[in-house]
Image: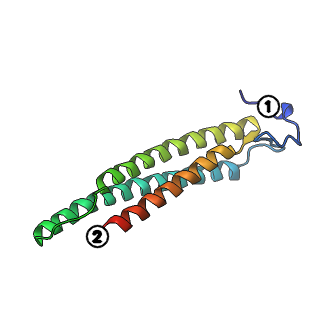
Amino acid sequence: MARRAADVREGDALSNERPMTTDVKATDVLANERTFLAYVRTALAFIAFGFVVARFGLFVEQFASATHMRMSGPHYSTGFGALMAIIGVVIGFLGAWRYAMADKALRTGVVKSLPRAGSYIIALLVAAIGVMVALYLTTYH
């Protein structure tokens, strides 16, 4: 349950809620919308990148067949591309949720920041994707 600005102590270091001292300004609302659009851009980039990665594996198979070359190594591109597209969809939903929560917080006067655990999870997810790409690129011959 969200606490009102009067219920949050000014020096409460353990809380991710901070009381706002002023009314909602147009700049705050527009900044929230820009952040949401950044989430949308990122989600679309993940989905498009997933599509490209999945189709790249098909291109390599067709190229190997046309040149009568034998492909070696595992082929993870379709699965990895689908995973990237799914992550893009999750990012889109996360952005919509964050937009709604920030809008509600602006209107009620209590702004919540992203919990530390959420930021660590996102960082680990990005690192895992990087490791998967690196492993794929090093195992592909």
Residue 83: x and y, percent? 38, 49
From the image, tell me which residue sits under label 2.
Answer: 141
* Contact? badges 2 and 1 (CB < 8 Å): no
Task: Say what secondary structure mark 1 lies in.
Answer: loop
Residue located 50% across and 47% down the image: 91
Label 2 crowding class (10 Å Cα cut-off): few <14, some 14-19, many 20+? Answer: few
Residue 119 drawn above or below residue 137:
above
Asked which quadrant contains residue 136, the reply is bottom left
Residue 63: x and y, percent? 17, 68
Of residue 62 and residue 135, the one placed in the foreground of this image is 135
From the image, tell me which residue sits under label 1.
Answer: 4
Q: Is residue 43 left or right of residue 60?
A: right
Q: Is residue 111 left or right of residue 101?
A: right
Residue 113 drawn above or below residue 135:
above
Residue located 73% across and 30% down the image: 2
Residue 69: x and y, percent? 14, 70
Q: Amino acid at mark 2?
A: His
Reading the chain from its start, which is encountered first: label 2 or label 1? 1
Of residue 117 and residue 98, the one placed in the foreground of this image is 117
